[in-house]
Amino acid sequence: MAQIHPFYEAHRGAMEAAMRQRLDLAEGMLRERARLPDIDAIRQEVMDEFEVVLTQMPYVGGAESRMSDFFMRLIGFMAIGRVLRRRGVSPPVIGDLERETYKAQLLTVPEAERLASGRQFMSPENQAWLREQAVKSLAEAFPEDFVYDFVEPGPGDDFEFGIDYKACGFCKFAARHGD
């Protein structure tokens, strides 16, 4: 039986809780847009598939990589997509459901916390860390990880910084597993 990487195993409870919340938020959309009446069966299928996805998750550096958090928060959408495709739901509907569900999940966080998170992300300390992370990503120590540049604004630019992704860890995962 395939194993879950110890880093992800340590975070498994939180990841499963996020999946259950996501499925709760998706329930109405699954009934209305995907025309799937048996939500309890779908919920169980998705959680079973999530177990498979957990064994397939690439290790991308754990706490040392900013992208580990992205994988842990978002890889569950692969499980949802797999189950919905098997049930005949079209990719555009799956995409809409997943985007709207993720937005709804983000909006469960109180506005003050979201704003504080945004301020922290834009902080000079975080920008310095992002620069370091971008340089590390270019070394591709973890082949299944994201690769990106930190983009400094030039003269006349009206943005604080950017991130230019050269390779997407989710795209690599999806290609490897047929998602």
Image (tube, rainbow, N blue to C red):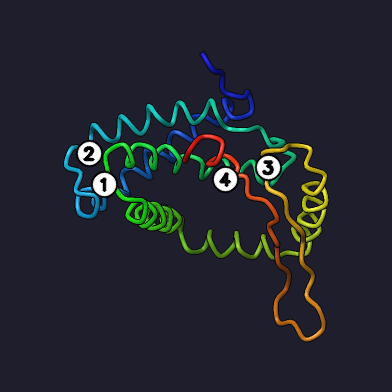
Residue 103 quadrant:
bottom left
- Give the mark nearer the N terminus: 3 vs 1: 1
Q: Which three-letter amino acid code belongs to the residue tagged 3?
A: Asp
Which secondary structure, mark 4?
helix
Q: Residue at x 16, y 42 (%)?
A: 37
Residue 7 quadrant:
top right
Residue, disc 1: 27
Residue, disc 2: 39
- Cβ–Cβ below 8 Å for labels 2 and 1? yes
Q: Residue lying at the far left in this picture: please name it.
A: 37
Q: Position of residue 124 (x, y in %)?
A: 78, 64
* Nearer to the camera, 44 or 95: 95
Q: Is residue 147 left or right of residue 76?
A: right
Which secondary structure, mark 3?
loop
- Give the mark nearer the N terminus: 2 vs 3: 2
Mark 2 Cα shell of 10 Å, populated few (<14), some (14-19), many (≥20): some
Residue, disc 3: 145
Mark nearest the camera among 2 and 4 is: 4
Q: Which three-letter amino acid code belongs to the residue tagged 1?
A: Glu
Q: Residue at x 68, y 47 (%)?
A: 146
- Give the mark nearer the N terminus: 2 vs 1: 1
- The CA distance from mark 2 to mark 1 is 7 Å
Residue 72's tag is: none
* Nearer to the camera, 12 or 115: 12
Q: Position of residue 145 (x, y in %)?
A: 68, 42
- Cβ–Cβ below 8 Å for labels 2 and 3? no
Looking at the image, residue 134 lies above or below residue 52: below
Q: Which three-letter amino acid code belongs to the residue tagged 2?
A: Ile
- The CA distance from mark 3 to mark 1 is 31 Å
- Cβ–Cβ below 8 Å for labels 2 and 4? no
Looking at the image, residue 16 lies above or below residue 156: above
